[in-house]
């Protein structure tokens, strides 16, 4: 009886842990940009959402920009986009449609590289 109860408890633990959602939020800012990356891990998948805000005074000069995000440790997480635009308030937001197997850890640091008008800024994002 104890063996059956033990197997039932372990099975239920595995079942319920598969349905857990874990969110990791990484935030950082540089001289011109502020950013937040949210990594949502659910049921063996990992999806990303990014918000980038231009902090500078010349919003009209930023027609388009490129960004690239990767981990500073193992390089498993990496995504980015070219030629994206800010809204009228200087904000860009995007949620990935694709997903990966969970690889991002809470203690990691992310590196965001933003390129606009021939200028590059690297920002370290921490949880």
Image: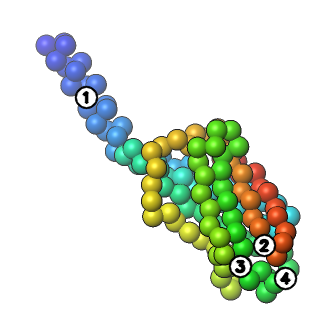
Cβ–Cβ under 8 Å for marks 4 and 2: no
Q: Earlier in the sequence, mark 3 or mark 4?
A: 4
Residue 64 seen in render:
yes
- Nearer the observer, 61 or 89: 61
Give the spatial CA distance, label 3 vs label 2. 7 Å
Residue at x 66%, y 75% (from the top left corner): 83
Give the spatial CA distance, label 4 vs label 1. 57 Å
Label 2, secondary structure: give it.
strand
User: Label 1, on which residue?
Assistant: 11
Q: Earlier in the sequence, mark 1 or mark 2?
A: 1
- Nearer the observer, 3 or 40: 40
Give the spatial CA distance, label 3 vs label 4. 13 Å
User: Label 2, on which residue?
Assistant: 116
Q: Earlier in the sequence, mark 4 or mark 1?
A: 1
User: Label 3, on which residue?
Assistant: 64
Cβ–Cβ under 8 Å for marks 3 and 1: no
The image quarter containing residue 106 is top right
Label 3, secondary structure: give it.
loop
Residue 21 seen in render:
no
Query: Which quarter shows the N terminus?
Result: top left
Give the spatial CA distance, label 3 vs label 1. 51 Å
Q: Residues within 10 Å of mark 1 (few under 14, many from 20)?
A: few
Label 4, secondary structure: give it.
loop
Q: Residues within 10 Å of mark 2 (few under 14, many from 20)?
A: some
> Closer to the camera: disc 4 or disc 1?
4
Residue at x 45%, y 54% (from the top left corner): 99
- Looking at the picture, does residue 109 appear above or below residue 91? above
**How far across and down, in percent of the image, does residue 126 sit?**
70, 48
From this viewpoint, which residue is outermost toward the top?
Answer: 2
Q: Earlier in the sequence, mark 3 or mark 1?
A: 1
User: Label 4, on which residue?
Assistant: 58
């Amino acid at each position: 009886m104890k063996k059956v109860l033990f197997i039932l408890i372990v099975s239920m633990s595995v079942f319920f842990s598969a349905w857990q959602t874990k969110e990791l939020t990484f935030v950082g800012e540089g001289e011109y940009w502020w950013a937040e990356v949210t990594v949502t891990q659910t049921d063996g998948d990992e999806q990303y959402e990014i918000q980038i805000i231009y902090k500078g005074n010349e919003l009209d000069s930023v027609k388009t920009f490129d960004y690239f995000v990767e981990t500073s440790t193992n390089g498993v997480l990496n995504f980015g986009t070219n030629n994206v635009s800010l809204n009228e308030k200087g904000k860009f937001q995007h949620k990935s449609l694709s997903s990966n197997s969970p690889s991002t850890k809470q203690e990691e640091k992310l590196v965001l590289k933003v390129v606009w008008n021939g200028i590059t800024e690297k920002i370290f994002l921490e949880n």
